[in-house]
Amino acid sequence: MRLRSLLFVPGDRPERFEKAAASGADAIILDLEDSVSLSNKEKARAAIADYLSGERQTFTLVRVNPLDSHFTAADVAAVIGARPDAIMLPKADGASSIAQLDTILRSEGAADASLPAILPIATETPQAIFTLGSYREVKDRLLGLTWGAEDLPAAIGASTSREADGSYTAPYQLARSLTLFAAHGAGTAAIDTVFPAIKDAEGLARYAATARRDGFTGMMAIHPSQVEPINAAFTPSTEELQRAHAIVEAFNNNPGAGVLQIDGKMIDAPHLKQARHILSLAD
């Protein structure tokens, strides 16, 4: 399954659900956490459960509230019967938080065979940074791994996570990089965080292209206008696909070769691995 773009939708805005699903996003995230006020939590739960109970064509996640909020069980109880495709867990804290969420899912009626996959937001607390490597212990339960650049600075009293030009300061570059490596270490999708400047289309395109260059496989979005540029960034170009096919074909035709030459350039096993990865993105 392709997860290039994952679009957030506030759970208390049901009139936006179908529009989000029709945006071209590979997945939508119906939110019960930050975008929903305390007074609207019940309304949002009911709206999400109603939407999930109908026919849907787009892969749909529900972002529940964090495990320390005392709202998680109520969130799960409200939506699990309608079979969300996955659960997004904010303020996750490594493998132990996945086990804790699984306990809640089972207690609210989810059978082991039908437990929804989990997408943790893995860097929103200081202690979570030190548990990133543990996700490989629960890799079979993961949809992917993503990170956030807003809650972490608030948690440690930092004034911002960004430089004046919008780039991340050193601590948050580190959090982003560790999430990337933790995702690949667990063999799961590496999903980059949101780009908050909705009207900066050029900036978004640059950021998404950099994310793919660095090894991320997709990215979250906060507005439907961001979906198309994100999808474009994480979709291989015709030229990339042609070269990838050529590399794979060359090694298929020369199964005993360790090193080959294409267009005057030497290629070896890492190039073959990258070519196969590019072809998988096209799938």
Image (cartoon, rainbow, N blue to C red):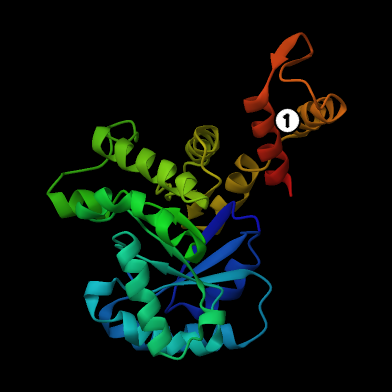
What is the three-letter code of the residue carrying label 1? Glu
Helix, strand or loop status at disc 1: helix
Q: Quadrant of the N terminus?
A: bottom right
Q: Is residue 35 visible?
A: no
Image spot of residue 201 (x, y percent): 52, 41
In front of the other: 18 or 168: 168
Q: Residue at x 62, y 27 (%)?
A: 270
Give the x, y percent position of residue 179: 38, 46
Q: Position of residue 30 (x, y in %)?
A: 47, 72
177, above or below 72, in the image:
above
For residue 105, above or below residue 176: below
Residue on which disc 1 sits? 240
In depth, the one of 189 and 222 nearer the eye is 189
Does residue 226 appear in the picture of this structure?
yes
Is 271 drawn above or below residue 280 in the view shown? above
Q: Give the total of numbered labels.
A: 1
Residue occupying the point 52% across, 75% down: 116
- In the image, taking residue 105 as reference, residue 19 lies left or right, namely right
